[in-house]
Image (cartoon, rainbow, N blue to C red):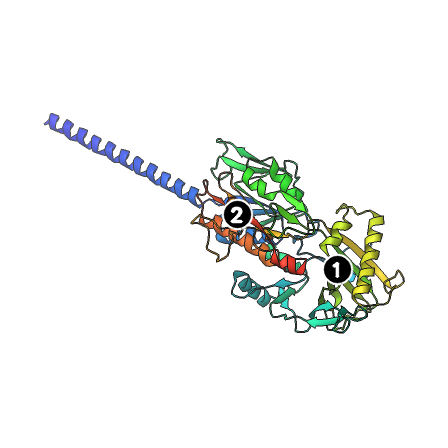
Amino acid sequence: MLKGIIILLFTLFQSSSFALTMNNRNLQMMAATKNVAAKSTTKQTVAIIGGGIAGLSCAQALSNSGRYLPTVFDTGRLRPGGRCSSRLPGEDTKKYNYLSQTIIDHAAQIINVAPDTEFKKQITRWEEAGHVKQFKDGTVCDITNPYDPESKKYDKTQIKLTAKNTNSMYYGANGMQSLPEAMSKNNFEMKQDVWVSPNKGVKLIDNNSNKGISNNSKFWQIKTKGSPKFDKLVIAHNGKCADRLMSSTPAKDLHQLLRVNFSPTVPKNGGNRMTLNSIYSLTFAIDKLNGIPENIICAFIKNHPNLKFLSCNTRKYPTDEKKDFEVWTVLSSAKFGKAYKGPQENLPPGLVQNVTSLLYESLEQSLALPEGTFTEDNILESRLQLWGAGVPLNTWKTSSTNANVPNNNEDCDGFLYDGQFGVGVCGDWLVESSIYGAWESGRRLAQYLAENTNDEDSKVGLKDGKFRMSAAVDKAGIGSL
């Protein structure tokens, strides 16, 4: 009987040990499953260099996807926006008395929206939220000279104003900066007034022992305060800085497409490198600009080689308190910008005076005004700015063979991406030289990243493409706006 009791106890012990062992294994499996789930739901971090429309669009879409934590680095002193920026009342009051009293759009002027696009849906949402407004009929025109069939010449002593269809034209309700302001309110981090040096400002590090970056052995380090690290990198600006920024990284195919030329024109075949023009923006305050009816807000200048666009900021953004002066912005042609180009960040006083005088003279001729209309006596204040990397004259067009790229019914992917290094590029030069093109490119890149988490072997837009001359820039000279 004692032997039977011993056998029974031994059996029970074995059963208990087996149960404990199985329970431990189950707990280990559950813990492992939990860890896998945690890893799969960990949000990846993305550094976006450039706070223009493309960068903000990408950040907004990435944040909304729920899979990424984007951080935007922007060099703007006061706010993001890039070429879609504005100066607001109350800024630079010590230097400017009149120009500091109104909203000033000194770069992008009009948002042109094509129907049946994602951008049109976004514009509708912005309009409902009060961020954008549609131009009223008769407020936008072309400026030309009437043609005399007898002499077969244009009469430069008169001007002809031809109203444009404004059904697809919008502008920011509180300046063009209303767009970046609306996008930057989204749930992502914004690093403002931060300079990422083009001299090795980003660095790809392959560190298998790194434990703080979403369990990823490769990460990008941004050489700013704190040297933050990110799983992925997005370049959302162009020009020499973007070229130099990526030149020291291993993403050679991507860097090759960021190399840039500066010219007022591009070959009909599109050329073999991204080409940017340069445009001067002159803003001035005057008692009243004669020759332009008060209903006109914006005008495309088509009768002078030095000028392309004219806009009245005080008419565009009226206030309850009526001002006894007007503030205008005139944009030069690319050929003029090239001919008188200087150091963008620090234009010499002599160059400023010369360029300003030439633009006034050109505007007098365009509007058929008497010589000497714009003098120091009637110009209250002025401010000159050079957009050295103005508008892309060509766009990079590809037709991806990657089945994961969304079908956008267009002849381009709209972005660049190299999964081997976790780096992408977005910008208007990858879709169309316009606000729409910038917004659409950022959205497409974000959509691709959100839908393709295992992308280490993917390459999008890097091969089998060509530069094509931008029809919009060729027509308007300053982009399709």
User: Circles 2 and 1: CB distance less than 8 Å?
Assistant: no
Q: Residue 441, position in %: x, y?
A: 55, 53
Mark identifier at residue 209: none
Residue behind mark 1? 307
Residue at the top extreme? Answer: 3
Residue 79: image x %, image y %?
67, 52
Is residue 382 positioned above or below 153 on the image?
Answer: above
Q: Tell me: 75 left or right of 322.
A: left
Report the amino acid beneath label 1: Leu
In this orientation, which residue lies closer to the viewer: 337 or 235? 337
Q: Residue at x 58, y 46 (%)?
A: 71
Q: Residues within 10 Å of mark 2 (few under 14, many from 20)?
A: some
Of 165 and 422, the residue lying toward us = 165
Place of residue 27 in the rendered image (x, y in percent of width and height, measured from the top left):
33, 38
Query: Badge 2 is on which residue?
Result: 465
Placement of 204 over or under 136, stated as above or below: above
Residue 356 is left or right of residue 479, and the answer is right
Q: Could you tell me residue 271's position as x and y percent?
A: 61, 48
Cα separation, mark 2 vs mark 1, equals 33 Å
Quarter holding the C terminus?
bottom right
Camera-side residue: 205 or 308?
308
Relative height, residue 474 to residue 227 (above, below): below
Residue 187 visible = no
Residue 435 in which image quadrant? bottom right
In this image, 404 relative to 478: left or right?
left
**Mark 1 nearby-residue class (10 Å; few <14, some 14–19, many ≥20):** many
SS of the residue under disc 1: strand
